[in-house]
Amino acid sequence: MIYEMRTYTLKPGAVSEFESRFAERHPYREKHSKLGGFWHTEFGPLNQVIHVWIYEDLNQRLAAREAANNDPDLQRIPGGREFVIEQESDIFMPAPFMRPMGGDQALGDLYEMRIYTYQPGAISKVIDSWKGSISAREKYSPLAAGMYSELGSLNKWVHIWPYKDLNERTRIRAEATGDPNWPPTPSTREFLVKQENKLLIPAAFSPMH
C-alpha cells in the first residue's frame, strides 16, 4: 500500500470554492481510486488543501490517474485549477504500526499533521524507536497516520493525530509528554533537521472526519 499526499496552495479566499468543487467531483474520482483524507489548513501555512489518495502500488496510481483524466464526468465539472498557486506531491509508505487509511483509522474534528525531516538514512531508526513507544502515546489519543516519504521530498516522517478541538489537543499533549515512555526512546532528535506542524480541518466528504 502507498499513499500519495497532494498539497495545493490556493489563492487567498479560494479554499471554500475549491472544496465545494472537489465535493461534487469526489464520487466520480472515487471510481478510480480511494480518498484517504481531505483537509484544509487552519493554522500553519494558510490557504492549503491536502488530500491523500490510496493505491496498491505505483502501477495502480498511474492507471487510476490516467482513467480519471479521461473520465467524461470529471471533465464536465470544473476542478478549480485557476485557484492553484503551487502543487506538491509526495509518495508515502506506511509504518508497520499504522492503521490503513480507509479502514478503522481514528476520526476527529481537528487534525494535527506533524512533518519531521531527518538526516539521510535516519528514517529506519525513527520507525524502530516509534515501534517500541507508540502504544504509550496511544493511551492518550490514537494515531491516525504514521508514514515516511519514498518519492518526492525525501527523509520525511509524517504523523497525523485527530482531536475533538484545540482544548483537547492541549490537554492530551501535556499528558503525553508527561509520560516517561513518551517521546519515543531511544531518542532520534540528533538526526532531526526540521520540524513543521499544521492544524487541519477535515472536509465534510473526507473519510477522516
Image (cartoon, helix red, strand yellow):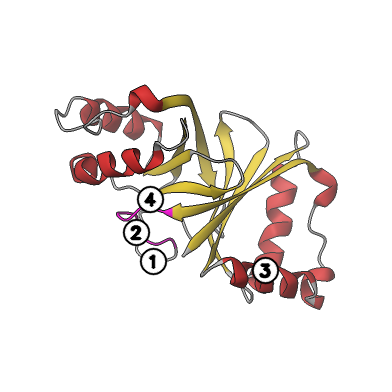
From the image, state whether disc 2 or disc 3 is nearer to you. 3
For residue 139, say whether it is visible.
no
Q: Distance between the residues labelled 3 and 1?
A: 23 Å
Q: Earlier in the sequence, mark 2 or mark 4?
A: 2
Occupied quadrant, residue 7: top right
Mark 4: amino acid: Ala
Of the numbered discs in the image, which one, if any, rests on residue 103?
1
Mark 2: amino acid: Arg
Q: Distance between the residues labelled 2 and 4?
A: 7 Å
For residue 119, say whether it is visible.
yes
Q: Earlier in the sequence, mark 2 or mark 3?
A: 3
Q: Earlier in the sequence, mark 4 or mark 1?
A: 1
Task: Identify residue for label 2.
Answer: 99
Mark 1: amino acid: Gly
| Mark 4 element type | loop
Q: Distance between the residues labelled 2 and 1?
A: 7 Å
